[in-house]
Amino acid sequence: MTIIHHPGADTLMSYAAGALPSALSAVAAAHVAMCDRCQHELVLMERIGWALLEGLAPVPLTDRRPSRAAPEPASTPLAQVGGDAANPILRLARHDFAGVRWRRIGIGLWHHPLPIRGKGSLQLIKAAPGAAVPDHGHAGGELTLILQGAMTDRTGRYGHGDVADLDETIEHTPVADRGTGCICAIANEAPTRFSGLLARLLQPWHGF
Amino acid sequence: MIGARQSLKADPGSLATNSYGAMSELLRRVALRADAAAFHELYQSYGPRVKAYLMRHGADGSTAEDFAQETLFTVWRRAALYASDKGSPSTWIFTIARNLWIDRLRRDVPWQELTPAHEEATSPEPLPDEVVSETELQLRVRDALAGLPAEQRQVLELAYLEGLSHAEIAARLALPLGTVKSRVRIAYQKMRAAVEDLK
């Protein structure tokens, strides 16, 4: 399993800045957790973050000392506490999506929305082998992470761990691999109501 | 080490590039001995800029100071886990402050992790050549940042210091989204090229 498709440098940098909309950030975090290359890039991007922060004029502290006592030291690396376990996308994937209540949204297509605070919407999409997701554009950015199986569109073939980082200018028709089908997490930047892919998918079924 | 500490005390607001070794040493003392004096030096060195960072994100002074405090407390709790060979203490502190602020906004499960590379069960003692390359890295990043055209630096500042998404930056600057993204990408290519031979 080799990851071929990564988020764009602009997307990753927005993530490093803490500025990527939450839904996209969740997908980026899941990809980064499985991608050494992006972890490596991210360290430089975070270094840039400090360099920018360092350029700010310091604001003197009112209290020279912290106003409350320091807490007990922790002994478990956050990467172990968090990592897979803390990211709901990876947790579901690791348990083979057990307990996910898939809702049918088309021929050979199911989805499962994931709750997300902040900006954007996030869902898992399951496509049966050979199922095509209708031609769609996006309102705002869209980040797709392949969690199981593979899909192909005119921008290439996407396997486990790959990310399709698409902006609203791209129209594509992903098709799930005939052998395996595909499960992916899709984050959309557009807020609250379904947009882009899901709007198109759900329209004929729910009439909105 | 005494010399390094004195220079810090002389100018607590200045986190000069050559303070990397001093900061790592403070962090090591915090890690190994839960050294409260070392912690207070870290707090006074980093607190004012972390506070400035959070105020730039829109926090008022007292909230920003609470967050600066929380950031350094997190450093205190996790000092023993800090992997000094994977980045500078300051970069690590940036990620902690950033994540605390994001968590506050989202009040949610921790979607955005600390970059795994920052925390690993490695020795907190940097090797001498690591100190040199770390210092060199910080200098290169700072120089490359200073060398960016104003329009590229501006988009980075809006993202990193104000937490604006690319769409929000585009709206703020009345620019097409594609222009914002390409400025970010070009700026990053330059920064990356500036450190290419060190990593």
Image (tube, coloured by chain):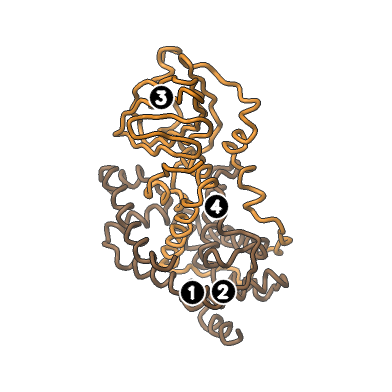
Q: Which mark is residue B15?
A: 1
Callout 1: SS: loop
Callout 3 amino acid:
Val
User: What is chain A's hue in the picture?
Assistant: orange
The residue under label 3 is A175
Residue found at the far bottom of this picture: B3
Q: Is residue B166 above or below residue B48?
A: above
Callout 1 amino acid:
Leu
| Coordinates of residue B185 in the picture (x, y in percent) | 32, 52
Q: Which mark is residue B99?
A: 4
User: What is chain B's hue in the picture?
Assistant: brown
Q: Which one is nearer the viewer's eye here, B81 or A158?
A: A158
Callout 4 amino acid:
Asn
Pointer 4 or 1: first along the chain: 1
- Is the Cβ of the residue at disc 3 closer than 8 Å to that at disc 2? no
Q: Residues within 10 Å of mark 2 (few under 14, many from 20)?
A: many
Residue at x 36%, y 34% (from the top left corner): A156
Labels 1 and 2 share a subunit: yes
- Is the Cβ of the residue at disc 1 closer than 8 Å to that at disc 2? yes
Q: Which mark is residue B23?
A: 2
Q: Is residue B172 above or below residue A54?
A: above
- The part of the image, by quadrant, that contains residue A71 is bottom right
Label 4, label 3: how far apart the Cα atoms are: 36 Å
Label 4, label 2: how far apart the Cα atoms are: 21 Å
Label 3, label 2: how far apart the Cα atoms are: 52 Å
